[in-house]
Amino acid sequence: MNQIVPSKRQSTDLVAQETQDFVTMLIEGQLFGIPVLTVQDVLGPQKITRIPLAPREVAGSLNLRGRIVTAIDVRLRLDLNRRGEEDKGMSVVVELGGELYSLMVDSVGEVLSLPVAKFERNPPTLDIKWREFSMGIYRLEGKLLVVLDVAKLLDFTRAE
Amino acid sequence: MDDLLSEFLTETSESLSVLDVELVKLEQNPEPSILQNIFRLVHTIKGTCGFLGLPRLEHVAHAGENVLGKIRDGELEVTPDAVTLILGAIDRIKAILSHLEQNECEPEGDDGDLIARLNAMADGGAPKPPPPPMPEFEPVAAKTAKAPEPEIPAEPEAPAETHDETPDTQAAAESHEEEHHDEPAPSVPATTSAPPAVRPQSAPAAPSGLTDAPKESAVAAQTIRVNVELLENLMTLVSELVLTRNQLLQMVRGRDDSEFTAPLQRLSHITTDLQEGVMKTRMQPIGNAWAKLPRIVRDLSVEMHKKIDLQMLGAETELDRQVLELIKDPLTHMVRNSADHGLEGPEERKLAGKPEVGKIVLNAYHEGGHIIIEISDDGRGLNVDRIKAKAIQNGLASESELESMTPQQIHQFIFKAGFSTAEKVTSVSGRGVGMDVVRTNIERIGGTVELKSQPGKGSTFVIKIPLTLAIVSALIVECASERFAIPQISVLELVRVTPSSENGIEMINNAPVLRLRDRLLPLVSLQKLLRLAGSGDNERQETFIVVTQVGTYTFGIIVDRVFDTEEIVVKPVAPILRHITMFSGNTILGDGSVIMILDPNGIAGSTGESGMMAGAQTAETHLAREGHGDAKTSLLVFRGGGDDLKAVPLALVARLEEIDVKDVEYSHGKPMVQYRGHLMPLIGVDGSLSLREEGRQPVLVFSDREHTMGLVVDEIVDIVEDRLKVELSTDTPGVIGTAVIAGRATTIIDAGSYLLEAFGDWFGSTKEFGGNEEHVAPRILLVDDSPFFRNLLTPLLSVAGYEVTAVDSADRALSLREQGNEFDAIISDIEMPGMNGFEFAAAVRADNRWQTTPMIALSSHATDKDFERGRSVGFNDYVAKFDRDSLLSTLSQTIATVKGAA
């Protein structure tokens, strides 16, 4: 379950202020990142109990070592299509306000240490929904990383 | 010692420890925040002392507070002497406290000197011109007092934590300190006259308190204050432990000789003890919630000019502090209501022939895992007419609806929002925001509130709440392949509905209802309610209805399956799901899966039924609860051979026919008809055959294999569905016994014996029956202690073509073996007096004579475990006692197998 270990830590000490560590996640080919320190766990496919009447983005709840974790399907949250049945996906567990949430994504990648200099604000052309959940973009070689705003992602009061 | 007092002592000694430290800090660094804290602590002490009626303490604390107040307001500066003086006040408080702890009363004495000095400080401080000399003296006092000061910060901890320090040294230290305080006294008279006047009195007082100083720590050492959160965490952990224990127990239950049994037993005990222990830490006497009631009632009685006697019983009854907090306000409100609305004024009471003093009784006690709190008054009771009027006025019900309601149902209106029948709104109650909130609050913690009221006699509210909210027992149900938990406390009963059961789910304009006994039960489909995807087959073979009660509203929740109950730890749902009112929480089951806990209140609310209209009284439901669950049998009721009602299980009757009496022919003097190309013998009930003179005669056609026979009856009365419970059995051939069917005593006839009679008589001998003439009928030994079953099975087996020897005990059977009898198969009961079936089988197998004879066990409870045991001791098969078909098929198969093998 916990195979992902930050391996590029050595650089952080040298340039403490200039880089930030992100756990990267892939959803429909797009790279997303959340700050590594907010991540509690990375999970494979889990047995999830559906919650009737819940917002559609709420996939259900699961048991993580005796704690109940609410699973959020990030795809649906980002207005993307539901994942295929055979594609089990992975989850990143984050804590917000004392509650654990499991963000269901397609796959979880390595931990990247990114120089702050490469951070940019959201381009104004970004989809409204995405703009809400994105804190900004990192320019990587050959691709872009969207930094997810976990708090906003889990704030269902405004969206619904 | 009084709980309140000991609590006060614990709390105050803690505050004092903090004060010592903070004051010293303040002296070094006069920051407003520190000052604020000190002020608050002293103020609290003063407030509590006043509340508890400790004037000496209160005065000292008050004077100290004054000085601190001035400092806080910037009128005085933080000077060493000011601090010293306040520390002096605190030491005095400590001295008094220690006396208080030992004697439960304040020591005699007067603190005038200290108070005077404090007041002087408060008044004097900077503005007073004369005091300039004072500072000259004060520094002296301060300096002398300073000497012991280093001990002061250490002192508060010393009693509580360092027990190795002997009381003597403490005492010495304190008295030493006090001496220092006293020392400056002689020099004081020189300037001011007030202190010396007081000094002589106070001097003896202080030491009197000091002698008890060493004991000060006793209370502090016995109790520690623990953060509630820590306890909550502990409780959660213990709850998880309980669940894990339960899970383990379940796993081991199936195995008799597991090596884990003993240690698990121990673990189980310890866990239970631990659970109780931790629960106790959260328990508080309900009296804590009542503490302020006498005062409230007193004030009310003055204001309303009523005479009220408040009696509180069972104040020591303990309950979870979480629950306690939640019922505090509802209780207060209800007592107020009783005092305000319930009780009459003295004049009215006299007129009604009651004692002038009205009585309100609070009674709390434990009852089966619940706390019951009764609040009763002997007042005028609820005014049904006024409630009716108000209900109409508020549009809650129409006049005609009210007409059909019982007074109890009408009473329920007072739990509606905005409902107050008080003619005038008093300062106390009558704003109509009360009872609905009371009910909501109580139901929120899984409790119920009931109301009984008699006009002129008074009203009683009965609150039933769970002991703790941490662990609840819940029923696990399934709907559309999803599992849910329903708190057991709201479940009244379970009803299984199959297409063949008497009362199915009926629809009134798409609203499902169930006829449950003599009531119509509104139903809620969980699948529809939770918008669950249908499992495809809409026509399920069976559904279950969880009859649920919320307040007085009873309704049924339709679910697909019901599992057993489980103890669960209720955990709140994630904030993003809190808006879903159907769930009160979620939990992790023993198998590790997450499950949502349904909230019956939310479900009731969603049905649009707020509570009372369809409500049946709880008592009724309780009464009606019993006697449910027995399977029902369709029975054909008829008359024949007498006027009494007779019945036969409908399943045995092949057809109902009416034959023309002209068609009846006689052969060998026996009546018969040609029926479907065969001859069908006709038999009369009780052996007496009385055919009609002419016309048509009803006949019950029984069919067994290719043989049919007609039972001539006088009249077919009805087909009813009822529980077949034979209450009186009999030895009369052809009769199983008597049962109550559709409310009437009815003879249950034994169709098997009639078949035997028909064909036995017809063919002359049972021996020749059995299909194959040259084949000898297999011989069966039937061992059963019950004559009823011997009588039931012997004809049945005979009809099936076996030669049956029936004996009433295993011993008898074994003696048959000794006589050299041989059988093709043995059918044995399990539960028998003397040698039981298992022992019998073992005995049979132990001897080589009957060793290969197949044996079939017959038992009323055929569980897998019994089955296993039966197999292991030598039974070839195991059949449930009432299952005649499977008995016959098992028998023929078993014999065939053995024959084939032989």
Image: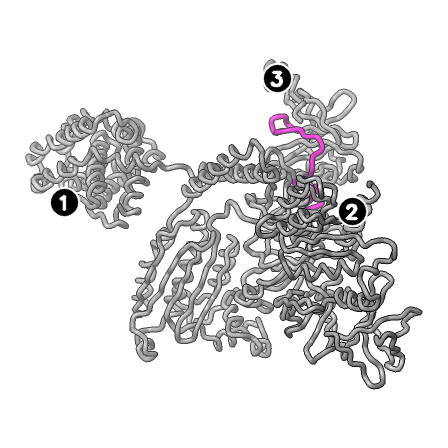
**Crowding at mark 3 (Cα within 10 Å: few <14, some 14-19, many 20+):** some
Give the vertical position of B792 relative to B713 (above or below). above
Quadrant position of residue A75: top right
Give the vertical position of A105 relative to B509 (above or below). above
Circles 2 and 3: CB atoms closer than 8 Å: no
The residue at the point 56 percent across, 43 percent down is B571
Residue B245 visible? The answer is: yes
* Residue B266 place in picture, x, y as percent: 48, 35
Quadrant position of residue B741: bottom right
Residue B369 in the figure: left or right of residue B60: right
State the mark number for residue B894: 2
Is B382 inside the magenta-drawn segment? no
The residue identified by callout 1 is: B108
Q: Which residues are magenta?
A: A34-61
Q: CA distance from mark 1 to mark 3?
A: 70 Å
The residue identified by callout 3 is: A12
